[in-house]
Amino acid sequence: MALLDGYRGKFKLRQVSLCLLVREMEVLLALKKRSFGVGKWNGVGGKQQPGESIEQTAVRETQEEIGVTPTSMRRVATLNFYFVGDTEDRNWNQQVVVFLVNKWDGTPAESEEMRPEWFKQNELPFQKMWEDDAYWMPQVLEGKNIIGHFLFDENQKMVDREVEESASAGI
């Protein structure tokens, strides 16, 4: 029995967005400068606010974190993350809705929270990213839709995963 089976469906997952800006064969990642995930390269995004659609969250968070406004984006993945030992005080369990953004207004710029940088899609810094990224990100950059489930221990190390291609990236 997979470790994930003890977590899937037992927790209310807060919904968050994650945007990957893409151009030609490059993807924009940003170095997290503070808070959860500090020191890791990731896409840009964050927590959904009350009354906001996940698409609105993606646009708002991208504006706040790197100063650009997505004008064309496509939902490509739904990723469910579970963290061993989470409590009401420390609830990192979340559902991440991933969007590929291929058009935007503005120029990516550093903020207090994120430092953006372009990477070739075949040279992503996986050793400085969340462990799960290596299992789903290359697939979405190839145009596939992904549904994923990931379990992390108390030290933020991945202990179980399930990733599958899907006809859609919906919930």
Image: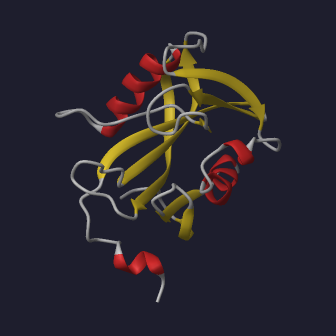
Residue sitting farthest toward the bottom: 1
What x and y, as percent, mark residue 38? Answer: 53, 34
Q: Which residue lies at the image location 50% right of the left edge and 63% below the top edge?
A: 148
Going 45% across and 38% down the picture, which residue do you hit? 36
In the rendered image, which quarter contains the C terminus? bottom left
User: Which residue lies most toward the front here?
Assistant: 155
- Picture residue at 48% right of the left edge, 27% below the top: 34
Image coordinates of residue 123 in percent, x first then y, are 82, 41
Query: Which quadrant holds residue 87?
Result: bottom left
Q: Nearer the viewer, residue 164 or 5?
A: 5
Provide residue 51's location: percent of width, then percent of height. Answer: 17, 33
Most extreme residue toward the left is: 51
At 27% across and 37% down in the image, what residue appears?
A: 53
Left of 126 or right of it: where is 86?
Answer: left
Q: Does 66 appear above or below 6?
A: above
Horizontal arrangement in the rendering, residue 103 relative to residue 63 (left or right): right
- Render colour scheme: secondary structure
Residue 142 position (above or below residue 31): below
Q: In the picture provided, is 148 more to the left or to the right than 136?
A: left
Whole-percent x and y of residue 130? 60, 49
Q: Nearer the viewer, residue 54 or 131?
A: 131
Q: How many marks?
A: 0
Picture layout, residue 114 above or below residue 74: above
